[in-house]
Structure formats: C-alpha cells, structure tokens
Image: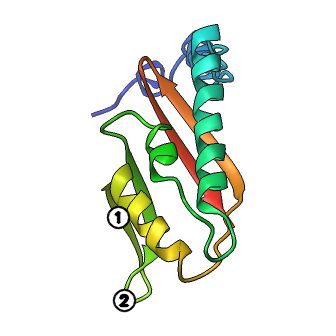
Amino acid sequence: MHTPTSARFPTIAGLLLLLLLTTSCQSAPTPAPAPSPADAAAEAEVRQVVDGVYAWVSGPQGTPKDRKALLALFVPDGRLVVAQAGPNGASVAQSMPVGVFADMVVQGATQRSFYEAPIRTRVDVFGGIATAWSSFA
C-alpha cells in the first residue's frame, strides 16, 4: 500500500505548532514565591532553636547541662533524629523524644568534652509545621 507523502510527513504548519508547543513546555520554571512574613518569622524562630541546641550540647567535660532548658526549646512532643554510624559502618537514623536526647547528652557530658557547630541548616516551613535539617561538625 502506498501512503501519500503528505500523510507520512507533517506539514510545515504542523512542525511550527510542534516547535511552539515544545518551546513553551521547556520554558524556565516559575520561581518559588517569596516566603510570607509569617513563614520567614517561623524559619527565624526554628534557626534560633537549632542554634540553641548546638550551644546546649557543646561544652567541656563536666559542664552541667540544664535538661529543662533544652526541653523548653521544643514543643512537648518534639523529636530529634540523630544519624550515627551503625555496626557495619552504614548510617543509621535514630528518632527520639527530646527528653531521651537530653538524658544522653547529660550523661555523656560527665564523661567527655563535646562540641558541635552547624555547617549548614535548611529549614522548611509548611503551615504550622517546620522541619530543620542541619549538618554539623
């Protein structure tokens, strides 16, 4: 069966339409809207909490740790996730209530000096929930 040339190949108008559609689909993404003043304020508050945790954790051996001061930085059901090397060397995430974390640090502070400083902190705010991701040294 012989197919006419016009049925096998798109017309110039069809190619132009395809080119226009492809070009419009490949335009630069729309930039994310600027955070609202409420979101910016929430992010600043979360960053203060992160800085407060680093300050609370850090100190020379024997430095007394006020457990209540750390708990006051978080909502009652707040949690921390700590990434540590597991037995096989792979990274393991351990989620815990803030109180459990505080107890670990209080106990460790009697045995050794410990210092942490943030390298980079990313804060995501969505409505009434904020998440902070912080890498540290």
| Image: 112 above or below 98 | below
For residue 104, the mark is: none
- Front residue of 87/103: it is 103
- Front residue of 85/80: it is 80
Label 1 CA crowd tier, 10 Å (few <14, some 14–19, many 20+): few
Q: What's the residue type where badge 2 is placed?
A: Pro
Secondary structure beneath label 1 = strand
Report the residue that reaches farthest toward the bottom: 88
Q: State which quadrant residue 15 falls in.
A: top right
- Is there a contact, CB below 8 Å, between mark 1 and mark 2? no
Q: Is residue 88 left or right of residue 137?
A: left
> Looking at the image, which residue is at 38% across and 65% down?
93
> Looking at the image, which residue is at 38% across and 50% down?
98
| Image: 15 above or below 108 | above
Label 2 CA crowd tier, 10 Å (few <14, some 14–19, many 20+): few
Secondary structure beneath label 2 = loop
Q: State which quadrant residue 74 falls in.
A: top left
| Image: 70 above or below 24 | below
Colour scheme in use: rainbow
Quarter holding the C terminus is bottom right
User: Which residue is labeled 2 in the image?
Assistant: 87
Q: What's the residue type where badge 1 is placed?
A: Gln
> Looking at the image, which residue is at 41% across and 68% down?
104
* Picture coordinates of residue 87, whole percent (x, y): 36, 89
| Image: 30 above or below 121 | above
User: Which residue is labeled 1 in the image?
Assistant: 94
* Picture coordinates of residue 95, whole percent (x, y): 33, 57
3D distance between C-alphas at marks 1 and 2: 14 Å
